Amino acid sequence: MRKSLSLFLLVFFFVKLGVHAQQNPKREFRGAWIQCVNNQFQGLGRDRMQETLTYQLDELQRTGINTIIFQVRAEGDALYPSAYEPWSRFLTGRQGVAPAPYWDPLAWMIQEAHKRGMELHAWINPFRAKTKGTPALTSPYYNAHPDRFFEYDGLWIFDPAIPENRDYICFIVQDIISRYDVDGLHIDDYFYPYPVAGLPIPDSHSYQRYGQGQNIQDWRRQNVNTFMKQLSQTIRQTKPWVKFSVSPFGIYRNQKSDPAGSRTNGLQNYDDLYADILLWVREGWVDLNIPQIYWQIGHPAADYEELIRWWNEHAPQRPLIVGQDVERTVKYAATDGSGATQTLQKYNLQRRMPNVAGSCQWYAKACVDNPQGYATTLRQTFHSTIALQPEMPWIDKKAPRKVRGIKLLWTQDGPILMWRVPRRNKKEMQTARKYVVYRFAKGQQQDLGNPANIHAITTQPFLKLNYEGGKQQWTYVVTALDRLQNESKGKKKTIRL
C-alpha cells in the first residue's frame, strides 16, 4: 500500500510540473517574429545590427526555433534594396536613406537562417503606408498617386478598395519572392485600420465608386477577401513552394455578434478589421494561420484557453499556429495553484489541441531574454527534440528520391558518414534540399517517427561523427527532404564507432 501511494504521489508530482510522458511531435512549426517597428535596429549600422541578429539567431536556434519571421516592409518601405519602395526609417532613421555601409538585411538574414537550419519568412504589412512617427513619405508610388490613400488617426493607409493598390502590393510581393530565396511570405493583423472611437474610416469616396449598392461592412470585407485571394495566387504563380501565412488578431467574433463566436468580449477581426480569417482558411488562400492569442489563461474578456479551443475547432483546414506573448505568459501565474508561470500550462494545453501545429513567439528578443526561464522550458521540455516543418500536401506531397551509396569514410579528423545525393529530379519541389540523419543503438527499434532518434539535419551530403573507441555499434538512417520537407525513404548503414 505504501509503495502504491508513493507511486501515485510521484505521478501526481510530474503531472503538476507539466512533464510530458508522450514524445514531442516530429513535425511542428516553431517560429519567432523579429520586428523592426520597435526601433531595435534604427541607427545601429550594419556591424552592430548583424551582431544583434547573430546573437538572437544563435539563442533562438538553441531554443529549438525552426522559423524566423523577419519584418521587411513596415510602411510601404523596405529593409532590402528595392527599385520601387524607399529604404525604411526603421533601419536608417530616415525613410529613403540607404544604409551605410551598404548592405542587404533580407539577403543576410536568409543566409544566416538557412545556415542554422531555419526557414526565413519575409514579413510585410500590406496596407500601412505611414506610421505616426514617420514625418515624410518618399515613396514614388505614394507621391504619384496620393489619391489612392486615406489618413486615419495619424496613419496613412493604402485604400484596400482600389484595384491598383491591390495590384501594386501583389507586385511588391512578387518582386520579393522572385529575387530572394524566402521560404514564406507573412502578413500581420493590419487590414482596415484598428478602429478609434468616434473616428469613421474616410472611404466614402471609394464606396461611392466601387460599392455597387453593397452594405459598406460587407463591401470592405470583400475588398480584403479579393486582395487575399489575389496575393495567394501571386505567390503560387511565382514560386509555388513559398508558404503564405497570416497572423490575425486573436478574436474572430464574439458570441454577442455571432452565436458561433468565442465567449469573449473584445475587438473582432470580422466586424472591426473586416478580415474574414475563416473564409481564407476554408478557401485555402493561406497555408498557415497564426492568430495572436496573446492573453493569459483566465483573462476576463479574452481567455487564452477559450480562444485556443475556439480556433482549434473552427479553423482545422490549415495548420493552426498559436501566437504566444512571451512576456504576458511569464507575467501571470498558472491557474492550477502550482505557483509557476503559465508557460507549462499554455504549452500543455496547446499540445492537446489536435489542429494546433506549433507556436510563434512574440517577440524574438523576449524569447531570447529568457524571462523566468521561458526559453529554458522550451529547450528542456517542449523543444527538446528537433522538429521538421508541418506537411502541406495541398501544395505538394510527393517526396524526393532517397539518397544513395551511404558509407563511412575515415579521415585524420575522424569518421565521416557520406552519401550520394538522390538521382536528379527535374522538378524543383522534389529536389533534395536537406538530409535527416537518424541514429539507433544495437537492438533499438528503428522508429523514424520518433524525433528523439534524429541525430542531425544537414544541408550537406555528409556528417562528421564522433569516434567512441570502436566498441559501440550504431545504425544510421539517412532520408532526404525537399523544400516543403516531404521526406524520402531511408537508406541505412551499420557501423562501429
Image (tube, rainbow, N blue to C red):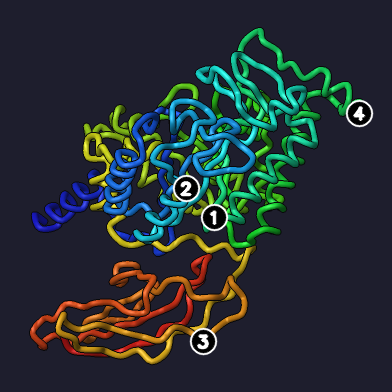
Report x, y in % for residue 417: 28, 83
CA neighbours of label 4 inside 10 A, class few (<14), some (14 to 19), many (20+): few
Circle number at residue 106: 2
Circle number at residue 212: 4
Tally of numbered tags: 4
The kind of residue on which mark 3 rests is Arg
> Would residue 308 be found to the left or right of residue 257 on screen?
left
Quadrant that contains the C terminus: bottom left
Q: Which residue is mark 1?
A: 180
Dot placed on the residue nearer the N-terminal end, 2 or 4: 2
Mark-to-mark CA distance, 2 and 4: 41 Å
Report x, y in % for residue 484: 53, 65
**Disc 1 and disc 2 in contact, CB within 8 angstroms:** yes
Q: Which residue is mark 3?
A: 423
Dot placed on the residue nearer the N-terminal end, 1 or 2: 2
Quick one: which residue is furthest to the right in this view?
A: 212
Mark-to-mark CA distance, 1 and 3: 26 Å
Quadrant that contains the N terminus: bottom left
